[in-house]
Image (tube, rainbow, N blue to C red):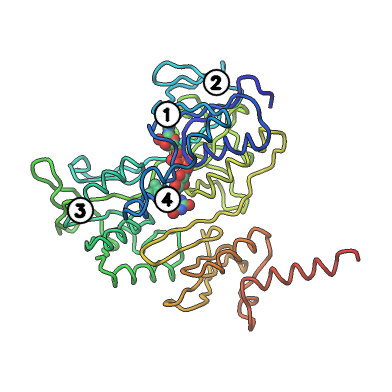
Amino acid sequence: MSPGSGVVVVGAGQAAIQLTESLREAGFTGPVSVVGDEPQLPYQRPPLSKEYLAGKVTADELALRGSRFYTDRNVELHLGRRAVRLDRDRRRLTLDDGTTLPYDHLVLATGARPRPLPVPGGDLDGVLNLRTLADAREIRSRLPDARDVVVIGAGFIGLEFAAVCRAAGLSPVVLDVAGQVMGRAVSAPVAAHFAERHQRDGTRLLLGRAPAELVGGGGRVTGVRLTDGQVLPADTVVTGIGVVPNVELAEAAGLDTGNGITVDEYLRTADPAISAIGDCAAFPDPRGTGRVRLESVQNAADQARCVAAGLTGTPHPYNALPWFWSYQGDLRLQIAGLSTGHDHTVVRGEPERGFSVLCFRAGSLIAVESVNRAPDHMAARRLLAAGIRVTPDDVAAPGFSLRSPLARTAETADRKAPA
Ligand SMILES: Cc1cc2nc3c(=O)[nH]c(=O)nc-3n(C[C@H](O)[C@H](O)[C@H](O)COP(=O)(O)OP(=O)(O)OC[C@H]3O[C@@H](n4cnc5c(N)ncnc54)[C@H](O)[C@@H]3O)c2cc1C
């Protein structure tokens, strides 16, 4: 792409900042602007529900890059500014202060926002979300006075928050309409292990239960009424029932959206001058499971690298292996691959000392979920990324480890290599 008006990125999160870095690394010399509606330097979200809430890191330590990064690379930041209009014919983006930014290529990296609670009472004081630094600051400032904490949603964020509450001496209640924790994102053995450990450590888990209403007095939340009529006392309610992708700017500009902004395998929308990456992008899964939208640092960063490569002359389809982590108390969950649609699992290791669940679909390994077994996770990432087929029979063989197929493939390659 010629340097002309350059690249404008909407959203100043993980995906946007990786894009600016990768563009400059690849030698792109044109203007690069980033527009973000949050006021502070772009920051990492994962520690918000872990180390930041636990008081182990400060807000400054969350910054993705220091301010020098942007000046050294000549990246123009428009922070605390919202992009409000996209004129595709004239290739111009308008911000909420009237500024107009021309572009040769626009990248939508608008992320997602918390799904609102579909019951009355969500606006009561004490009902909180956990997506932004401002949200986490609010929760952190209230935790010392909290007594009765209810978490709605037993997903990654809800459970991470519950673990932080327990470390602070609280006994949270976590409720979820689903019958297992972490929904369909993990296999049944991993979900069961986490549920058991959370309960053993002092969290009250109410699965298969739904809130009907948040009740309050004097504008403050005092409880959560369930659909069966039971009322859980609550002075603090944190909701974590998933997110909604920020697609409105794209939609208003006539781009195709659904569960995310629709892009092709190169992460381009139907308009060749516009791409979408990260939490907001719905892309064709190279593993053939249909159109997917992923919410992870790996996905945001790798999609940014892919678009930067395309804009600097080395386009390639997006096919990175998805991986993810979640830290809940002393449980370290690491996932390689997507286990969606698995029909068979094999557990290796000991629940108390660390284990991995190998997920198969139609006889092939598609994902590995490791709990306190980091070496398995690293081997699984290499194995799955290399596309080496592993079957349940391979796993049943004596002495099998996730490293053995990699070693076997390397030996075969050595034998085939000309002397
Ligand atoms: C509490 C928490 C814990 C997490 N933990 C993990 C974890 O352990 N591991 C993991 O892999 N992932 C984790 N994630 C997910 C991960 O943080 C996200 O997948 C990642 O941040 C996505 O990056 P993004 O750049 O696509 O979007 P975001 O980080 O959401 O950035 C998008 C930005 O764009 C802004 N924006 C939107 N619309 C506009 C507009 N019109 N104009 C200007 N700005 C706009 C948004 O306000 C936001 O600041 C966690 C997320 C949260 C919230």
Earlier sequence position, callout 2 versus callout 1: 1
Q: Secondary structure at mark 2?
A: loop
Residue 150: tell me if it is visible. Answer: yes
x and y percentages locating residue 330 in the rendered image: 38, 67
Q: Estimate the spatial distance between the alpha carbons at disc 4 and disc 1, rounded to whole Å.
A: 21 Å
Q: Estimate the spatial distance between the alpha carbons at disc 4 and disc 3, rounded to whole Å.
A: 22 Å
Q: Which residue is mark 3?
A: 144
Q: Secondary structure at mark 1?
A: strand
Asked if the residue at label 4 sits under 8 Å from ligand 1, the reply is yes
Q: Which residue is mark 4?
A: 46
Q: Secondary structure at mark 4?
A: helix
Kindly identify the amino acid type of the residue bearing the numbered disc 2: Arg
Q: Estimate the spatial distance between the alpha carbons at disc 2 and disc 3, rounded to whole Å.
A: 49 Å
Tell me, for residue 418, which label it has, or none. Answer: none
Quadrant location of the N terminus?
A: top right
Earlier sequence position, callout 4 versus callout 3: 4
**Circles 2 and 1: CB distance less than 8 Å?**
no
Residue furthest left in the image = 218
Kindly identify the amino acid type of the residue bearing the numbered disc 3: Pro
Quadrant location of the C terminus?
A: bottom right
Q: Estimate the spatial distance between the alpha carbons at disc 3 and disc 1, rounded to whole Å.
A: 31 Å
**Circles 4 and 3: CB distance less than 8 Å?**
no
Q: Quadrant of residue 327?
A: bottom left
Kindly identify the amino acid type of the residue bearing the numbered disc 4: Pro
Earlier sequence position, callout 2 versus callout 3: 2
Q: Which residue is mark 1?
A: 79
Kindly identify the amino acid type of the residue bearing the numbered disc 1: Leu
